[in-house]
Amino acid sequence: MGLFSIFSKDKKEVLDKGLEKSKTSIFSKLGHAIAGKSKVDDEVLDNLEEVLITSDVGVETTLRIIKRIEERVAKDKYVGTSELNSILKEEIAALLQENGSVSSENGEFKIPEGISGPYVVLVVGVNGVGKTTTIGKLAYQYKKAGYKVVLGAADTFRAAAVDQLLEWGKRTGVPVIHQEMGSDPASVAFDTLQSAVSTGAQVVLIDTAGRLHNKVGLMNELTKIRNVMKKVVPSAPHDVLLVLDGSTGQNAFEQAKQFTQATQVSSLAITKLDGTAHGGVVIGISDQFKIPVRYVGLGEKMEDLQLFNREEFVDSLFS
């Protein structure tokens, strides 16, 4: 129990440090919003609305949060500004729960129950968001948890993507299935799943091309990959993970919009949160698109990719 407590504390410290810029920015704005006020009134709520919008939470989500707080204030008759922070944390955590962001148990990387055959994750996202790096870190975390992992280099559009994934394979000791540059991505995915089944791999992570200049082309490509995978593992993919760069703020919303229109995204990984004050995008994107956040990237180290825990995230951001 003692060792587990130390491990949990270390993970929370990484989260706190990773969100430090976002937290500092929010608290500075929040301090100005309630300056000279002892009671949460209309003026405080108007100021809070501005704080959340300028912290990249997004307009729709901000209005939803403000409405929740207004209802709390109306019900309790009097709410002091000293209570505002705890109420804010409670309502945002509840919002994330409604969007399906399940807090991971003990922060352990586990395959979901009821999966028949290998657990297949199709990873999507534009170039530059940290997609391939996230796959490498996931390979490390799942291997560390005791699973046999295989990677598929289905981003055959960009030679650097294949090379990068091969490098991650070397670093983590995980095999990478790949073909020549320009090969059919669906063929790579098919070979990857066949290899996984024949070798008894339990986790399959497949990289895909990160381009959005032709949404119809992307949609067709991803649909073809999904259909081909089902020939080997009928229930695949079990997760379509969209990787977004948290440091891009509102641009991440647009990327999420484009990809959710192009394919059936089932979870989110928000990366590069350690170098930005845009941590609020995690809340806004999850709420606006009703997609659960599964992973957050908080630094360069392989251990800095964490399973999302909504309570710890909100606590780190607003405490």
Image (tube, helix red, strand yellow):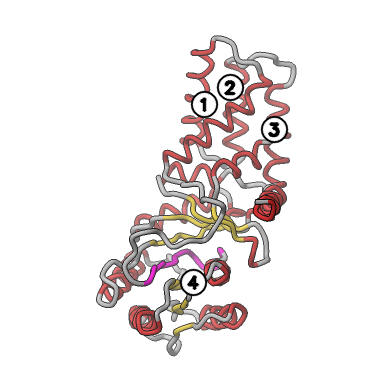
* For discs 4 and 3, the disc positioned in front in the rendered view: 4
Which residue matches tag 3? 29
Q: Work out how far the residue at label 1 is from the one at label 4, CA to CA, in angstroms.
A: 43 Å
Residue nearest the observer in this picture, 33 or 283: 283
* For discs 2 and 4, the disc positioned in front in the rendered view: 4
Mark 1 lies on a secondary structure that is helix
Q: Point out residue 282 in the picture as x, y percentages from the top left corner.
A: 54, 47
Number of numbered discs overlaid on the protein picture: 4
Q: Point out residue 295 in the picture as x, y percentages from the top left corner.
A: 53, 56
Circle 3 Cα neighbour tier, 10 Å, few/some/many (<14 / 14–19 / ≥20): some
Circle 1 Cα neighbour tier, 10 Å, few/some/many (<14 / 14–19 / ≥20): some
Tell me which corner region of the image, top left, top right, bottom left or bottom right, holds residue 239: bottom left
Residue 120 magenta: yes
Mark 1 or mark 2, which is nearer the start of the sequence?
A: 2
Which residue matches tag 2? 45
Mark 2 or mark 3, which is nearer the start of the sequence?
A: 3
Left or right for 230, reference 32: left
Task: Give the amino acid type for the residue marked by disc 1 in the picture.
Answer: Ile
Circle 4 Cα neighbour tier, 10 Å, few/some/many (<14 / 14–19 / ≥20): some
Q: Point out residue 110 in the picture as x, y percentages from the top left corner.
A: 48, 61
Residue 263 seen from this side:
yes
Which residue matches tag 4? 147
- Most extreme residue toward the top, as rendered? 77
Circles 3 and 1: CB distance less than 8 Å?
no
Mark 4 lies on a secondary structure that is loop
Circles 2 and 1: CB distance less than 8 Å?
yes
